[in-house]
Amino acid sequence: MATDRGGENIDICNEEDGVLLFTVNEVQEDAWRESRSMKAVIVNTFQEFLAAFPENDLAEFINEYDPERICFNMKIYRSTSYYDGISVAFTIKVNGGMYSMCCTDQMQICFKSGDSPARIDGNTSNMIFYQKIFCQGDPDVFSFESSLKKGYYLALIQENGRHKLGLKQSQDDVDTSRAFDIHMKNGS
């Protein structure tokens, strides 16, 4: 039997002569811990590559294969709480600098200078996205839901004739703007 008392977990461990003996353990707080990482190229339904332009806080889909801008490091995180999907973060090295892809409170995509941390506390993060199988019929195509705001997904946003990466609220399971193929690269 366990009870909760102000962030501590109290367990009854024994009974001696009618006296209950307790142990007090700290409750494990919600957090993500980096588990592993792999190199990945992200492709949309138009067969365009996701490219990072951190100097402009922009992620855009392009036709050209530019290894420096399209080869993301997809970091897998283990979580202390359960959620439907694999917790991932995206980083990329461009022009010698490391950048982490994030979303803002206004649900925009941006890049922070630096690598994603090995541990992220809490149960929401602007860096963590839940990777989910997009369609049961095609297990190689994924969607990525923001952990910062449930129901918002990474999606292709058409703006001024360009295909950019943004966040889009989606209830529709067949919204292909949020479907992405992940190509794993050697050397991960």
Image (tube, grey):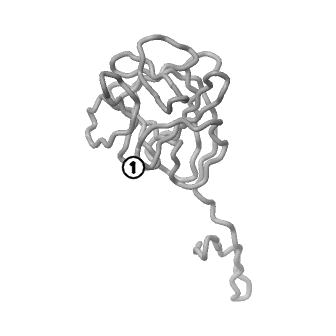
| Residue depicted at 39% across the width and 49% down the height | 150
Spot occupied by residue 180 in the image (x, y as percentages of width and height): 40, 26
In this orientation, which residue lies closer to the viewer: 30 or 16?
30
Spot occupied by residue 87 in the image (x, y as percentages of width and height): 52, 41
Asked if residue 151 is positioned above or below residue 141 in the image, the reply reads below
Q: Residues within 10 Å of mark 1 (few under 14, many from 20)?
A: few
Spot occupied by residue 132 in the image (x, y as percentages of width and height): 42, 36
Kind of residue indicated by mark 1: Lys
Task: Residue under label 1, please give it.
Answer: 150
Spot occupied by residue 171 in the image (x, y as percentages of width and height): 27, 43
Quadrant in the rendering for residue 138: top left
Quadrant in the rendering for residue 84: top left
| Residue depicted at 55% across the width and 20% down the height | 71
Asked if residue 32 is positioned above or below residue 99 in the image, the reply reads below
| Residue depicted at 30% across the width and 41% down the height | 170
Q: Is 21 displayed left or right of 133 in the figure? A: right
Question: In which quadrant of the rendered image does the C terminus lie?
Answer: top right
